[in-house]
Image (spheres, rainbow, N blue to C red):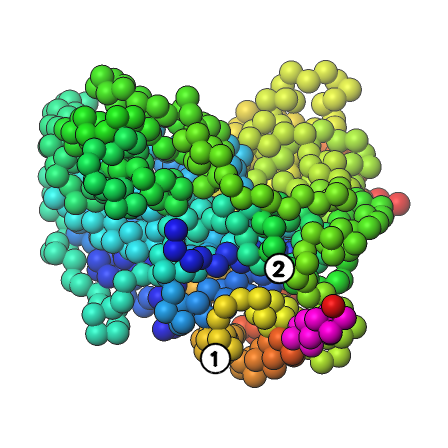
Amino acid sequence: MTEMTNVLIVGVGGQGIVLASDVLAEAAAIAGYDVKKSEIHGMSRRGGPVFSHVRFGERVHSAVIPEGDADVILAMEPMELLRWTSWAGVGAAACYLAAPILPVGVDAYPEGLEADIARLFPRVVRVELASIRRSVPMKVRNTALLGAASVFIPLAVDHFAAALQELSPRGTYEANQAAFDTGRALAAEQLRESADVE
Amino acid sequence: MRTRLLSGNEAVALGAWEAGVAVGCGYPGTPSTEILEALARQPEVYTEWSVNEKVALEVGVGASLAGGRALVTMKHVGVNVAADPLFTAAYTGVRAGLVVITADDPDMHSSQNEQDNRNYAIAAKVPMLEPSDSQEAREFTRLAFELSEAFDTPVFLRLTTRLSHSKSLIAPFPDGLPVRSEAPIEPGFLPDPPKYVMIPGHARIRRRVVEERMDALRALADAYPANRIEPPDDGAVGRPRIGIITSGIPYTYVKEVAPDAAVLKLGLVHPLPRRLAEQFAASVDILYVVEELDPVIEAQLKAWGIDCLGKAAFPAIGELSPTVVAAGLGRTSTAVSLQPSVPVPVRRPGLCPGCPHDHVFTELRRRGMIVSGDIGCYSLGVLPPYDAMDTLLDMGASLTIAQGMDIVAPAEQKGRIAAVIGDSTFAHSGITGLLNAVWNKRDGLYIVLDNGTTAMTGMQPNPMSGERIGREDAPSVDYQLLARAFHIPDENVGIVDAYDAVGISAAIGELAGRTGVRLLVAMGLCLIEGQKLKRVDKLNDKKAVRRELIALHPVRGVRD
């Protein structure tokens, strides 16, 4: 089989999953790859879990990632990362926003969840809300997370920039690009630090 | 937009536009909704959200008969509503191309059932195309118009959620820009009563035409370019061991997991190509049929005496996936997936924080009402924290199921039965139920949850909302005048502010204690719609109109 990159973007309704995955897919298309993405709209957006599959490579058949084949999971919420881990294989990378959202009707957030994430994903970027809260406006937080995850995705920053230019809602390209750059720099720094520790 | 990454739905709209479609109509329903939304942005095309799917298909038939290509869109269960005109439109045929989109929902991501609408193509004797990606969705839309005109028949294009909402690359435009071609039919209705007036004497003649047409389509199917045999992708030469007949989205899963298989890819899924299937079956050792939901292809192959493995290997329930198809072919995945050790709680969908439906459900639950529900965001009233819905069947069924219950329910239940229905659903098929109740002198408390939009499917206007497609201002139904025309006494009718918890409680208390048909409208603008209205500077006007309606039609309830 030809080389394929599988990215799963997950979160909770309203977190901008669809736009983030649109930008990633567009970046892959601009880079010259065949690309498909798949998500489900509808009932799921009313506060339920939301997911989007993005696949690119020389030739993509299925828009759905085969279970166990995701190379990267980008999660806008820690619990949602864990919910979707079975889609990832050994050695997959993860990037997540460490901002827990308690599901309606659940009393307490599960304990030991982040330790489990650390155990499962040797390559992980954990974006603390405090680290972006002031520098990244709420509306483009999804783009900051995509920027952070981009360190694991084999596409050039120029391709992402071109996709952001194409798809950012009118008048928001600069804010989106700044958010992307912030996320990417933060992730790169984190990976450098963890490499130093090792 | 320079992007060539289109969703299946956007690609259908592009294909229809390129084919010179004159009219696009439909009723919103996931996963079909975005087709008309995309088409409505094209000024050359007349588009409308119709009152319901039956109405939409009839408008489409009329447009076709007058010489304009028409695209009619709906979700799978919408075809149930449109089935009446559909079956007889197969008899009358068309003039300009008439293409009906059925967007099926395997896995019921956003639906109340999982019906496989390929069965409608068979039952109605209408040809059906099924694309596998966005480029095919675009191409097949054009093919569907051509087929419709060539064979004088409505044509189905079947999509599924996974196709409608997936994006893939479409082929580049010749000079960088899409080209709209002129539809080949001259506008103008040409009277032809034996063809268009289906009294029994005419229909008996057309009945034969339908069968002759299907025979001609069967002959076409064997050589139709959308049906093709593909050799294995692994480059192996010689007789392939495995052959797979498939169509639509499952084709992409087959190509993903079985590069060693020869594939008969069907673009025309009704009627099926007998000779091509026989030829393909004879060229392989083991023949599989990979199709989502019902064994439609498999049953036909077996009826022709072609041995194949279908539902014995692949599930008939839910969506397929690369993983499921691989398992059905007996291939165990080598991928080792990560397994969390911490259990992850379920994240249930729910009404948005601040949703205008909140107080009505809270009050219905507090009073222990038996609630006959309907289809929309408010269907979520069945879930915690409300637990305030007892039935949900189909569009418009809330009022009528409540009526049936009331006829036979014991006395202690009678006063506790209520129906809830959204504004769009009320216009779709709730008004007929209200009329039925009045005419038959029933007792019932019917509550319209009017949030000013068709929220569940992403904010489409409806006949109650004061706008038509494209946010164009339009007349809206006056609930009070409607009730008066139906002879519902004024004291049995009220419009209350959905955000006024005390007012809602008082109104439900007052109306629950009365007899006869009672109509309560809980009017509160959907928060998401409010944001959208604000962006186009319409929010204040809309709020003012609704405040006025609430002030004009108070319910004389006791505010406790």
Indicate which disc residue B222 carries. Answer: none
Q: Residue at x 45, y 41 (%)?
A: B322
The residue labelled by disc 1 is A158
Q: Residue B222: horizontal and vertical position, in percent?
A: 14, 35
Q: Secondary structure at mark 2?
A: strand
Q: Residue at x 20, y 70 (%)?
A: B174
Indicate which disc residue A93 carries. Answer: 2
Q: Is residue B557 magenta?
A: no
Tell which subunit mark 1 falls on: A
Query: What amino acid type is highlighted by mark number 2?
Result: Ala
Q: Residues within 10 Å of mark 1 (few under 14, many from 20)?
A: few
Q: Residue B359: horizontal and vertical position, in percent?
A: 76, 47
User: Observer-nearest residue: A169 or B353?
Assistant: A169
Q: Specify the quadrant that holds the C terminus of chain B.
A: top right
Q: Specify the quadrant that holds the N terminus of chain B.
A: bottom left
Q: Residue B51: horizontal and vertical position, in percent?
A: 43, 46
Q: Residues within 10 Å of mark 2 (few under 14, many from 20)?
A: many
Query: What amino acid type is highlighted by mark number 1?
Result: Asp
Whether residue B356 is visible, yes or no, is: no
